[in-house]
């Protein structure tokens, strides 16, 4: 099987999973955007995905993302940055990413705004919220829920940044349905104060059903489309 045929088949399976989860949740599949996470995979895969109709791709490492976005200029792709942000790299990330899903500290906001302004663009921002139990040693990044308001104010105060909503990763070892149920509560509370923040990015290859059930508008799928990730070099 060619790589293209393999990706096409995997995309079809993932879309079927999304569709079934939407039916189960009484939701319209049009309301769930598939972001294909291409980290660690070559730019040739990104090109094939674009040919197969993928419009949203996600990357979590700045250098890799920057290089791929440059090589794929003109392919009509929307780049989502989903990885840990360093404040000294934030401006550079905003120079190619149209969506930054991992805003979790005030310190990165001004850099993002600067990079977006330099490009003359508006960058869509999601605040990454930690779903770790309070007091747990943080296994994944993200702002604790009580810090979202300050962070939202920081983003809202920047002309070139648009507050779109929240992003989260289910904590390792947690029951996804429970974690995303908690996320749904946090998101509802957040949306009551920020009407424009309608996006909710949650769900990966292993837990997209639970995420769609909890109201995710964006799912970030890597291995279910591209296969197991190559080992880190
Ligand atoms: C790698 C990654 C994904 C995709 O994970 P899969 O399990 O391969 O689908 C989603 N979200 C984030 C933040 C990631 O780093």
Image (tube, rainbow, N blue to C red):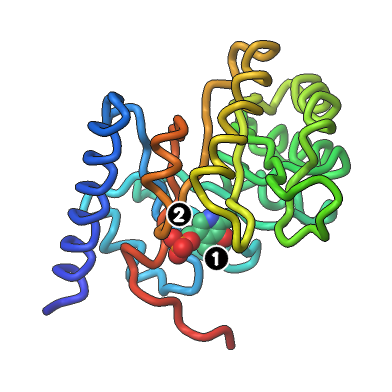
Q: Indicate the quadrant where residue 157 lies.
A: top right
- Residue 38 place in picture, x, y as percent: 44, 63
Residue ID at (73%, 62%)? 139
Q: Nearer the viewer, mark 2 or mark 1?
A: 2
Q: Is residue 160 above or below residue 182?
A: above
Task: Tell me which residue sits at (72%, 45%) in the image.
Answer: 130
Residue 67 left/right relative to 87: left
Q: Position of residue 83 (x, y in %)?
A: 64, 57
Residue 71 at least partly seen: no
Sooner in the amino-acid sequence: mark 2 or mark 1? 1
- Asked whether residue 177 appears in the rendered view, the answer is yes
Asked whether mark 2 lies closer than 8 Å to ligand 1, one says yes
Residue that numbered label 2 is attached to: 204
Instruction: Check residue 76 in the rendering and tell me which mark sits there, or answer none.
Output: none
Q: Residues within 10 Å of mark 2 (few under 14, many from 20)?
A: many
- Which mark is drawn over residue 67? 1
Q: Residue at x 50, y 67 (%)?
A: 39
Q: Nearer the viewer, residue 225 or 210?
A: 210
CB under 8 Å between callouts 2 and 1? no
Q: Secondary structure at mark 1?
A: helix
Describe residue 126's horizontal placement relative to residue 139 as left or right: left
For the N terminus, the quadrant is bottom left
Q: Position of residue 47 (x, y in %)?
A: 31, 62
> Considering only vertical position in the picture, is 232 above or below 100?
below
How far apart marks 2 and 1 lie (CA) works out to 24 Å
Query: Element under label 2?
Result: loop
Q: Residue shown at 59%/32% (left/top)?
A: 124
């Amino acid at each position: 099987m060619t790589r293209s045929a393999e990706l096409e088949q995997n995309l079809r399976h993932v879309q079927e999973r999304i569709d079934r989860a939407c039916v189960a949740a009484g939701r319209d599949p049009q309301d769930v955007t598939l972001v294909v996470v291409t980290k660690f995979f070559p730019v040739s895969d990104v090109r094939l995905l674009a040919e197969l109709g993928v419009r949203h791709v996600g990357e979590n490492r700045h250098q890799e993302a920057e290089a791929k976005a440059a090589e794929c200029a003109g392919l009509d792709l929307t780049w989502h940055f989903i990885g840990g942000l360093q404040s000294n790299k934030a401006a550079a990330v905003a120079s190619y990413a149209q969506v930054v899903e991992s805003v979790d500290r005030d310190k990165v906001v001004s850099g993002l705004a600067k990079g977006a302004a330099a490009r003359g663009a508006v960058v869509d921002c999601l605040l990454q919220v930690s779903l770790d139990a309070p007091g747990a040693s943080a296994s994944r990044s993200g702002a604790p829920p009580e810090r979202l308001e300050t962070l939202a104010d920081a983003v809202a105060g920047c002309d070139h940044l648009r507050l779109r909503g929240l992003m989260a990763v289910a904590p390792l070892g947690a029951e996804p349905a429970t974690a995303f149920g908690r996320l749904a509560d946090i998101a509802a509370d957040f949306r009551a104060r920020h009407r424009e923040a309608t996006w909710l990015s949650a769900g990966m290859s292993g837990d997209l059903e639970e995420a769609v059930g909890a109201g995710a508008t964006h799912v970030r799928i890597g291995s279910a489309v591209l296969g197991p990730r190559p080992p880190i070099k």
